[in-house]
Image (tube, helix red, strand yellow):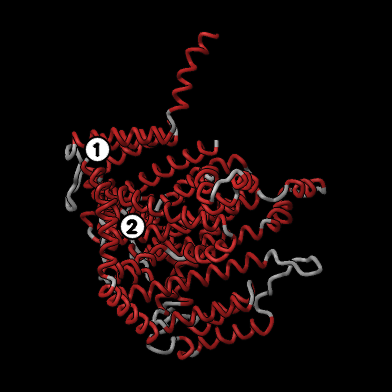
Amino acid sequence: MAAVADATAPVATIRKKVSRPMAVAAILVVWLVLFAAFRGRQTLTLAAADLTGLHRWLNDVNDSIGANRNSNPVFLYFFNEIRLVIDNLVSFVQSLVSQPAGGRPVPQIGWLGVVGLAGYVSWAVGNWRVALLAVAGFTFFGLQGLWQESMDTLALTLSAVLVALLIGIPLGVWAGLSDRVNRIMTPFLDFMQTMPTFVYLAPLTLIFLIGGASAVITTVIYAAPPAIRITAYAIRSVPETTVEAADSLGATRTQQLVKVLLPMSRRTVVVGVNQTIMAALAMVTIAALIDAPGLGKTVVQALQSLDVGTAFNAGLAIVVMAIVLDRVTTAAAVRTETRRTDGRFLKWRRPLLGAGGVAAAVLVYLSHTYVWAAEFPGDGTVGSHLASGADTATTWLQDHLFGLTNALRDALTNGMLNPFQTLLTDSPWWLVGVVLVALGAALGGWRAGITAAVCVGLLVGTGLWSDSMTTLASTAVATVLTMLAGVVFGVWMGRSALADRLIRPTLDAAQVMPPFVYLVPFLALFGATRFTAIIAGVVYAAPVAIKIIADGVRNVSESTVEAATSAGCNTWQIITKVQLPMARSALTLATNQGLIYVLSMVVLGGLVGAGALGYDVVAGFSQSELYGKGLAAGLAIVLLGVMFDRITQAAARRTRA
């Protein structure tokens, strides 16, 4: 036994000496050496118009499904029926608030009724401030000249949220009550929330065609996971002592659920509703790529024609809608926990009661009966002025900041992006594959290495290796910039309560905005380039990374910081030698979330000249001969997301251990 111990001692010593940073550095050095020797060989480059056998096969599958859609029993009695039900739901909601219906030239409830209902519901579940915000926000849509588009977006969002909650809340309750169900659901929910929004579009249009119904189905699939996950968490968070007390009183399982678990988890469930609404709004706007009506369509058309003014006006409407919906549901969540001085829960005001309910009913009647109350008055001059102002500001910025913006773009592009992209795209595919597998194993362990190997093999199979590496380069550069911003602002917020109070509301507001709107201002500054997508990705991903790092730094024990201070460490030493090393798990988690957010925005940047996989997906929607290639690009995006997620999650677990 002593001999065995003596033999294994050197191995253990070597393992201790070879840290993960050293292993990563060694892998990168070997990569650079082999890159110099094999540059330009076996790169698997594919031209934009070229197709592989897989792409042609997917095109044939698409054609075959289209030809047999109305005769194949699976489509005839299952998928087509689902599409019909969703289509009827969408048409019904649209006929209420946005589209003419029943021979009427206007919807059943016109603008005045919608504004009245929005104000009353906001007051009923929140307070008068939220109601005032809702009324102002909805009125602003009309002043922008975007009432019709805004109501179409609202109709699709509400339809998707209704279906998502009907599916998500029961599944969440089930997962909350059953450990087995929760274990089964968790990997699927993780996978669904890892996938960028872009990825859902192509495969679902293959089954459900393009249009509003497909947009709602896509949105339901994307928005349901937050409802399931948060509802399950809410049920599991109810104290066991409370459940045991109900059980000792003879309550049945159903009575425990209805009388104890659901009422006590009400606030958290409403938070889940909030997250579902935000996810639905984000997806509905992106679903404009599959011909979904609404504000997203206006933004897509404006981005494709580089019309910054129109894109800004529509993007602002999306932001306003997101803020209104977020504040209303947040107020509802807070209100469920507000107590009166006598200790009882403060009940929501009941609908259809009181002066507010009567006023809302009168406004609905007027908007249903009279054209002047149904059609928003005016010609949208506010929107015209906003678009004109955005165009003027864009022109001014381009004229006066041309040197600065170009210098910044060129410095980052030539200094970071181009060299790394060249390293990825000009290295032999097998060399990059080996490096990715080795990095996965070094950072996350052997399981992460196996995951990386599988993803690399499938990426090669998609026929889009070069485009995948281009997207990987942009994602990696944007993630580095995101983490730099995250560390700087996160440390500042973690060390200063005042900075946290000042910055956190801005970060919260930034996370409310759908990803589409981030492209607009940077399109004005930097034009239609891949750099635009990278910077938009940094701004989109930075808020979540900053907050995670700030919380990690704040959670470092005060006694540890005080001990370092008493030992004579200055501020820089405390940050670099104490707080950041002790917040390693938060840094790794921030990297994980930053990667996923960045990847989502980088592929969306295909709309503004980013190219690579994002362009392949967009081209697949617009050109039928490239549909198979777009579908393969969606699969490649999923593979990149899974690889990033598994490696960084495994690294986070190893860091905590």
Quadrant location, the C terminus: top right
Whole-percent x, y for residue 70 in the image:
33, 56
Question: Quick check: marks 1 and 2 in contact, CB under 8 Å?
Answer: no
Q: Earlier in the sequence, mark 1 or mark 2?
A: 1
Q: Could you say where residue 67 lies in the image, as x and y percent from the top left?
A: 27, 54
- Looking at the image, which is closer to me, 352 or 308? 308
User: Of the residues shown, which amino acid type is indicated by label 1?
Assistant: Trp
Give the side of residue 11 with respect to residue 623, left or right: right
Residue under numbered circle 1: 429
The residue closer to the viewer here, 119 or 148, is 119
* Residue with the mark numbered 2: 534
Up-down relation of residue 468 to residue 436 (above or below) = below
Report how far apart the C-alphas of labels 1 and 2 lie in the structure.
24 Å
Question: Does residue 482 appear in this view?
Answer: yes
Percent coordinates x, y for residue 20 in the rendering: 43, 34
Q: Is residue 156 above or below residue 362?
A: above
Circle 1 sits in a helix, a strand or a loop, which is it? helix
Q: Secondary structure at mark 2?
A: helix
Which residue lies at the image location 27% right of the left edge and 39% below the top edge?
A: 460
Is the residue marked by circle 2 packed among few (<14), some (14-19), or many (20+) residues within 10 Å?
Answer: many
Question: Considering only vertical position in the picture, is 163 above or below 172?
Answer: below
Q: State the residue in front, 488 or 295.
A: 488
Q: Is residue 76 visible?
A: no
167 sits to left or right of 336? left
Question: Looking at the image, which residue is at 49% across and 56% down?
Answer: 546
Q: Quadrant of residue 371?
A: bottom left
Q: Which mark is residue 342?
A: none
Q: Quadrant of residue 363?
A: bottom right
Residue depicted at x 48% and y 49%:
590
Q: Which of label 1 and label 2 is nearer to you? A: 2
